[in-house]
Amino acid sequence: MANRPQSEEAILRATANASVKAGPIELLREPYPGDPTREIVLLLATFSPGDSTPPHRHPGVLVGYVLAGELEFQLEGQPLQHLAAGDRFFEPPHSTHVVSINPCPTTAQVLAFIVRNVGAPNMIPLPASTPSAQKAAAPEPPESSPDSPPN
């Protein structure tokens, strides 16, 4: 492994340890060239079966790549996407991410590349009182059967 770039080494180490620690692992943080107010961050997010994130925003541009498993993904105002290993997605700065869940019985891993202001958080959870958060947290109504009385 001596000939691999440092970031590839970090991905391999993080992937090997993913079963030990779920959630995002920072693999790289570098200054943005020519702009000392911005930085580039590379994260590895691991989702165990059924894991999800609350509705949230990212403070900068995010490009994601599904390394393994499957992920349901939705930005506010866009259709739900079912992503699998090899798929990629884009989140404009401050867009509302309403669905992010691993619906499968296997672990999912996502590599996320973020350009943001220096020191900004990776994720900004939405307060439960916002319409986006309420909509995302609302349970689906139960399906009625032919034998059920109408509501």
Image (cartoon, rainbow, N blue to C red):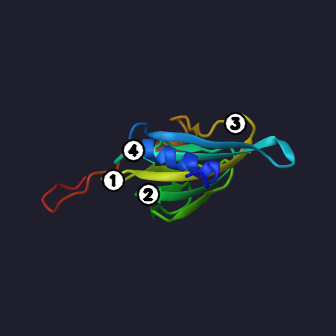
Amino acid tagged 1: Thr
- x%, y% of residue 10? 57, 45
Whether residues under marks 2 and 1 lie with C-beta atoms below 8 angstroms apart, the answer is: yes
Which residue is label 1 attached to?
106
Amino acid tagged 4: Asp
Choose mark 1 or mark 4, whichever is in front.
1
In the rendered view, tell whether residue 94 sits above or below residue 125. below
Work out how far the residue at label 1 is from the one at label 4, CA to CA, in angstroms. Answer: 11 Å
Whether residues under marks 1 and 4 lie with C-beta atoms below 8 angstroms apart, the answer is: no
Alpha-carbon neighbours of circle 4 within 10 Å: few (<14), some, or many (≥20)? some
Choose mark 3 or mark 1, whichever is in front.
1
- x%, y% of residue 111? 55, 52
Whether residues under marks 3 and 2 lie with C-beta atoms below 8 angstroms apart, the answer is: no
Query: Farthest residue toward the left?
Result: 147
Q: Which of marks 1 and 3 precedes in the sequence?
A: 1
Secondary structure under tag 2 reads strand
Work out how far the residue at label 3 is from the one at label 1, CA to CA, in angstroms. Answer: 31 Å
Q: Residue at x 56, y 43 (%)?
A: 56
Q: Residue at x 57, y 48 (%)?
A: 9
Q: Which of marks 1 and 2 precedes in the sequence?
A: 2
Work out how far the residue at label 3 is from the one at label 2, CA to CA, in angstroms. Answer: 27 Å
Query: Farthest residue toward the bottom?
Result: 86
